[in-house]
Amino acid sequence: MGEFHQEGSITTIHGFYDLFDLEEHLVRLEKKLEAFSKHMCISLLLPSLYDEVHVPGVLDNIVEQINQVNYLCSIVVALGGAKEEKQFKEAKEYFYNLKKEGRDVKVVWVEGPRIQTIFKKLQEQRIPIGVPGKGQSVWITLGYLFASEVCDVIALHDCDIVTYDRLLLGRLIEPTANPNNDFEFCKGYYARISPTEREMKGRTTRLFVAPFVEALASIMYNRGYSELGQFFSYHRTFRYPLAGEFSFLTRLARAINIAYDWGLEVSTLSEVYTRLTPKKIAQIDLCKNYEHKHQVLSEQDAKKGLHRMVVDIAKFYLNCIRSHGMPIDDAFIDMLQHTYYSKALSFVKSYSDDAESNDLVYDRHQEELTVRYFRDFIATAWAQARGEKEGTQIPSWNRVIYSAPDIYDNLLEAVEKDNE
């Protein structure tokens, strides 16, 4: 059972269900959601790569678990990586297994000619659409959901969750679907412990984002930038800011910009921060443990693995600082690297002690080496950000319709024809 501590400005919803009968809790939870679904439409957005259709056991289990729930009115798959029509048809046939009475299922073929034509049209009107990836796929699929005008609540989670069960889905959705608590955005969090290797995972969150954001908050407060200090303190409140699981109200989703790179999750948190009061934001303990595919460190190649992830996230935060009127130069980056490194080593010590008391495997030497790499990646992020005039966000759909008034009609026609 998790502790009940509330920290920061947002509400934390803990996993107290561990105290009680799990099956009974699940029955009560789904009964509530089914009652809510009589008065609202709850949609699930699944970003998936074509290759994930062929991962034995993982996606099959996700589909099986989702098919046991009755409160979803629609499921839309944001399919990336399907270069050929044959691949799209194969994936479409697979995801159509999610269809049931009262539930619509659509697959958005992001690389398909119809969606690509829409992208080209938007580019011709000088609307930035980013580059291919999860963020772009999520953005265009959200556009289709908005065009459909059927959903009130949207939940999103990845398709590579090894430990997935329908309790995770229900808990993810309940805070925003529940009309009695007034939440408009809910972020998932969870433990990341490998049961086979008996070690901590989530390196980017543990060793980079947590100490980096804490360093930035401290620097901003010390320099008199209290607004930025509050912004980074807000980010530090989230227990797993890089979690790919969240739910939000459709009216909020329409208004937020979407990052197209690995900054997607922290960008979303930032957008929510600017549009909601803290009491409309929650984070929820989704499950006892969470396992999915892991990225390589990729020390030498900034285009791959954790290297790219850290650079994209750091670049997003650096752009946030500049957009709030604080100048950045090489001396600031040098100071930031030293401050981050000092705080990260303190985090490593805490992780080591935590692992020791819980009888986990912990390679402190390797963790400290990883922190050194992450420190150096900050300089790479600055080198990239320095020459860029725009960030890595795609405009909100509320903004896009001003430049492309017929975009929703185009999206509806494209997706419907692809799914015939």
Image (cartoon, grey):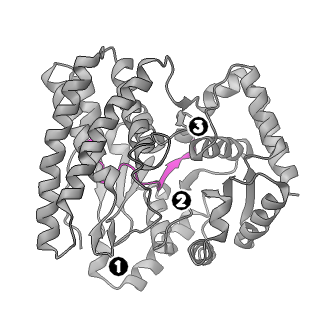
On screen, residue 290 above or below 180 = below
Asked if residue 197 lies left or right of residue 186, the reply is: left
**Between residues 372 and 120, which one lies in front from this camera angle?**
372
Q: Which residues are magenta?
A: 236-250
Kind of residue at disc 3: Arg
Q: Residue furthest front?
A: 300
Q: Is residue 187 left or right of residue 210?
A: right
Q: In terms of sequence position, does the residue under pointer 3 or pointer 1 come before the other?
A: 1
In the displayed structure, 180 sits above or below 316; it is below
Could you say where residue 271 lies in the image, as x and y percent from the top left? Answer: 44, 34
Task: For residue 272, say whether it is visible.
Answer: no
* Residue position for label 1: 196
Please tell me whether mark 3 sits on a helix, a strand or a loop.
loop
Which class describes the residues within 10 Å of circle 3: few (<14), some (14-19), or many (20+)?
Answer: some
| Quadrant of the rendering where the N terminus is positioned | bottom left
- C-beta proximity under 8 Å, tags 2 and 3: no
**Residue appearing at x 39%, y 65% in the figure:** 286
Reply above or below: 351 against 204: below
The local secondary structure at tag 1 comes to loop
Residue that mark 2 sits on: 158
User: Looking at numbered disc 1 in the image, what kind of residue is underneath it?
Assistant: Thr
Q: Pointer 3: what residue?
A: 254
- Please state which of residues 230 and 207 is positioned toward the viewer in this rendering: 207
Alpha carbon separation for disc pair 2 and 1: 22 Å
Question: Is disc 2 placed on a helix, strand or loop?
Answer: loop
From the top left corner, tell me how far across and down residue 312 is, in percent: 44, 37
Q: What's the residue at 20%, 51% (across, down)?
A: 368
Q: CA distance from mark 2 to mark 3?
A: 20 Å
Mark closer to the chain start, 2 or 3: 2
Question: Which picture quadrant has residue 101?
Answer: bottom right
